[in-house]
Amino acid sequence: MGRLSNLFRNPFSFMTTRSQSEERLAAYIIREHGRGRPLDEILEDPYVRNHAEGQVLGRVFERPEVIHAIGEDAARSVQP
């Protein structure tokens, strides 16, 4: 019942929610890039390739924390 009352408080909240898969993928990319790995190499990882179906990867590279971590130019070059 708590979720239903939240929906009535903010009926458009579903538009800004992010999936757990996106959250984990973003965290993985940030962590691996922080370890010094190049972005090209990270994008070829099986984990990224298995979890980046459809528009997910594009949304991940629109996230402010990812842009900040890898750089604006790098994030822009990956977006479709």
Image: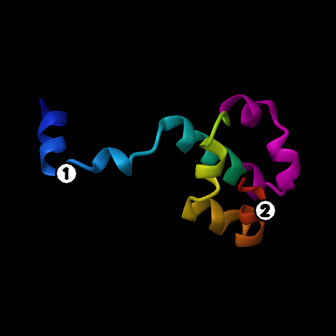
- As drawn, 7 above or below 36: above
- Mark 2 to mark 1 CA distance (whole Å): 34 Å
- Main SS, magenta region, reads helix
Res. 37 visible in picture? no
Q: Please give the name of the residue rendered at 19% of the width and 51% of the height, measured from the top-left corner.
A: 10
Q: Position of residue 29 (x, y in %)?
A: 70, 49
Residue lying at 57% horizontally and 62% vertically, measured from the top left: 65
Visible residue check, residue 30: yes
Please state if 40 lies on the left or on the right of 5 as rendered. right
Q: Position of residue 63 (x, y in %)?
A: 56, 59
Q: As shown in the figure, which amino acid type bears the numbered disc 2?
A: Ser
Q: Quadrant of residue 1?
A: top left
> Is 20 in front, or is 33?
20
Q: Which mark is residue 65?
A: none
Q: Is residue 10 magenta?
A: no
For label 1, the residue is: 10
Q: Which residues are magenta?
A: 32-51
Q: Quadrant of residue 33?
A: bottom right
Which secondary structure, mark 2? helix
Q: Inspect the magenta stretch and tell me whether residue 44 lies in it.
A: yes
* Residue holding disc 2: 77
